[in-house]
């Protein structure tokens, strides 16, 4: 084997993806292999690895596969394109470093019995970025309630909540990619967990006493498909809005049967 030649299994392991995903990327022309061995296995060279790195970076930014193909076709200079990605990653790195320093200073103050420095405690956090949108959709009280709830959490509680969100997103994608129906027991169990999560967030119509939870859940499912910011959370390897549509359909079925 050449030093600049990796099998599909090796690339899948190194990139933290699957051979199935890489074959799909080949099928849609996004990442063709450098060569195909006599046994039919795909192999990739250094240039293909650079392209795969760019694909994965763009996926992290929330782009769908068709949009990624357009970007890669439009940008011919790989080094300059990666410089743009690097700048975005460094911005995120800086934000995370500020959050780490903020939390560390709080821990130091708590353990040392020192006064908390309120102006430093939320450096790097931007949970207010959707404030105007939330207030426009559901009113100022909705945002105030959810903001108060979020600020009242401990670091451990926030981490647990974020892990719950991450687990839901992962399980939705797995369900959508597995070929099961939205009405299946497996998909409906994820839908149940999703609704339980929604009703536990103060300020949302799902948590409000007397609120129309059914209409809210169905409407939110539609928004997952219509708004690419939310749809990106459920993007499957096949790209497009398939994942978000699966979530929408499963939530609708659950809501109509249980809410």
Image: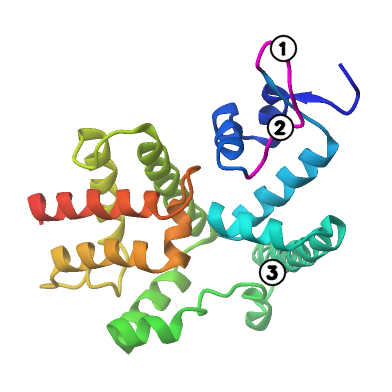
Question: Nearer the N terminus, badge 3 or badge 2?
Answer: 2
Q: Residue at x 45, y 65 (%)?
A: 228
Query: Toward the viewer: 214 or 117?
Result: 214
Query: Toward the viewer: 167 or 2?
Result: 2
Q: Tag 2's secondary structure? A: loop
Indicate which disc residue 165 carries: none
Give the magenta-colored segment's residue range. Answer: 30-40
Q: Residue at x 18, y 40 (%)?
A: 183
Q: Is residue 179 above or below residue 129?
A: above
Is 194 displayed left or right of 53 in the figure? Answer: left
Residue 184 percent coordinates (x, y): 21, 35
State the residue position of label 3.
102
Quarter-of-image position of residue 252: bottom left
Q: Residue at x 52, y 79 (%)?
A: 129
Residue 84 percent coordinates (x, y): 79, 66
Indicate which disc residue 38 carries: 1
Count of marks, rendered view:
3
Q: Are marks 1 and 3 in contact (CB under 8 Å)?
A: no
Which quarter of the figure is the N terminus placed in? Answer: top right
State the residue position of label 2.
33
Q: Is residue 87 above or below residue 47?
A: below
Q: Tag 1's secondary structure? A: loop
Which quarter of the figure is the C terminus placed in? Answer: bottom left
Q: Is residue 155 magenta?
A: no
Quarter-of-image position of residue 150: bottom left
Between disc 1 and disc 3, the foreground one is 1
Quote the CA–CA distance across marks 3 and 2.
Answer: 45 Å
Quote the CA–CA distance across marks 1 and 2.
Answer: 14 Å
Residue 181 percent coordinates (x, y): 24, 37
In this rendering, does residue 60 appear at all? Answer: no
């Amino acid at each position: 084997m050449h030093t600049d030649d990796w099998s599909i299994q090796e690339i899948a392991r190194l990139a933290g993806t699957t051979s199935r995903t890489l074959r799909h990327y080949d099928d849609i022309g996004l990442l063709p292999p450098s060569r195909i061995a006599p046994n039919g296995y795909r192999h990739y060279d250094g240039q293909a690895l650079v392209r795969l790195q760019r694909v994965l970076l763009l996926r992290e930014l929330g782009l769908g596969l068709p949009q990624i193909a357009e970007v890669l076709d439009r940008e011919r200079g790989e080094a300059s394109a990666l410089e743009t990605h690097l700048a975005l990653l460094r911005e995120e790195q800086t934000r995370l470093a500020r959050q780490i320093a903020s939390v560390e200073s709080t821990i130091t103050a708590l353990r040392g019995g020192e006064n908390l420095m309120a102006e430093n405690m939320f450096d790097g956090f931007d949970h207010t970025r959707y404030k105007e949108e939330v207030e426009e959709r559901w009113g100022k009280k909705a945002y105030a309630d959810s903001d108060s709830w979020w600020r009242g959490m401990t670091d451990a509680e926030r981490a647990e909540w974020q892990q719950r969100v991450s687990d839901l997103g992962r399980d939705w994608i797995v369900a959508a990619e597995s070929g099961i129906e939205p009405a299946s027991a497996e998909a409906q169990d994820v839908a149940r967990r999703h609704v339980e999560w929604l009703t536990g967030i103060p300020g949302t119509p799902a948590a409000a006493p007397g609120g129309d939870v059914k209409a809210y859940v169905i409407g939110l499912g539609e928004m997952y498909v219509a708004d690419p910011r939310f749809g990106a959370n459920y993007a499957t390897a096949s790209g497009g809005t398939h994942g978000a549509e699966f979530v929408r359909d499963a939530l609708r079925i659950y809501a109509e049967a249980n809410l």
